[in-house]
Amino acid sequence: MSKPDVTRIKAFLLQLQDDICHALEQADGEGCFVEDAWTRDGGGGGRTRVLRQGAVIEQGGVNFSHVYGDAMPASATAHRPELAGRTFEAMGVSLVIHPHNPYVPTSHANVRFFIAEKEGEDPIWWFGGGFDLTPFYPFAEDVQHWHTVSHALCQPFGQKIYPEFKAWCDRYFFLKHRNETRGVGGLFFDDLNRWPFEECFAFMQAVGNGYLDAYLPIIARRKALPYGERERAFQLYRRGRYVEFNLVYDRGTLFGLQTGGRTESILMSMPPLARWEYDWQPEPGSPESSLYRDYLTPRDWL
């Protein structure tokens, strides 16, 4: 198995953060990302970039992190006992965008690389990542576009990759206690080292670059749609599901906190405003009920 080129991976991730921030600023039209560089006591650091109160984006963050250390956190070794006793290095770009307009979906993406090494033994490494869409008032053409981009970027790597990683996304972003998906899915993959390094790296790059192709046309179509207090209240209620998933299930959040990462950067994914309401149910036949009826169960969007 070919040895990973960590320097090239880091260079790609730094450029990806730059490219995504620039493109989202252009799509927003007013807001700018503010950078907050940080260092980790145990080794490494990162660049947190946050855009607040833009014309389109209420709050969005695009993070780069590169951390390393002598011991793996419990969240990693519990599933991979062979990592115990190895030094580790992890790097990635992670982003979450929370728009003002309830007709513009929330989006999430991340791509990451991990390597664990021990003297005298081969390194253990893999890539992970993906992107997923969380609409409040969905449009079928937007969801189909999102999945069409996902399918297209997977095609050069084999016919079975999209259905495998699409299904993985549906399983991962599922709130068991609510018995519903977080949104309409996309792609999710982890532990990717089934191919030689160059091919695995190329797939991670395709996913990272594909996010903008998937999301920007949706912003353009929906950002000017009028909305009122009803739509805003429902958006904030559904954002509560986002918080529940990130705090209860998200492995990246757990890994970041257990490795002593920067808390503000790890929790950057949280929406600026959210609400909960006891035993709320959508009115039958309402636009809100359509989300539950037609979009929060995995299905074939192509």
Image (cartoon, rainbow, N blue to C red):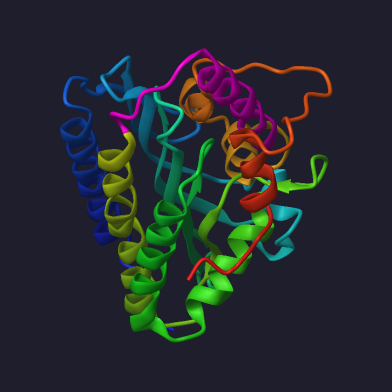
At which x and y percent is residue 302?
A: 48, 71
The residue that appears at 55% across and 25% down in the rendered structure is: 235
The residue nearer to you, when weighing 258 against 294, is 294
The residue that appears at 37% across and 35% down in the rendered structure is: 63
| Screen quadrant of the N terminus | bottom left
Q: Can residue 84 be seen at all in this image of the molecule? A: no
Q: Left or right: where does residue 30 sit relative to residue 46?
A: left
Magenta span: predominant SS is helix
Q: How many numbered marks are there?
A: 0
The residue nearer to you, when weighing 290 against 191, is 290
Residue 35 location, quadrant? top left
> Up-down: is 14 above or below 78?
above
At which x and y percent is residue 168?
A: 62, 65
At which x and y percent is residue 246?
A: 63, 35
Give the residues drawn in magenta, as a range. 223-245
Q: Left or right: where does residue 186 sit relative to residue 179?
A: left
At which x and y percent is residue 8?
A: 24, 60
The residue nearer to you, when weighing 253 against 154, is 154
Q: Left or right: where does residue 184 sit relative to residue 212?
A: right
The residue nearer to you, when weighing 106 against 76, is 106
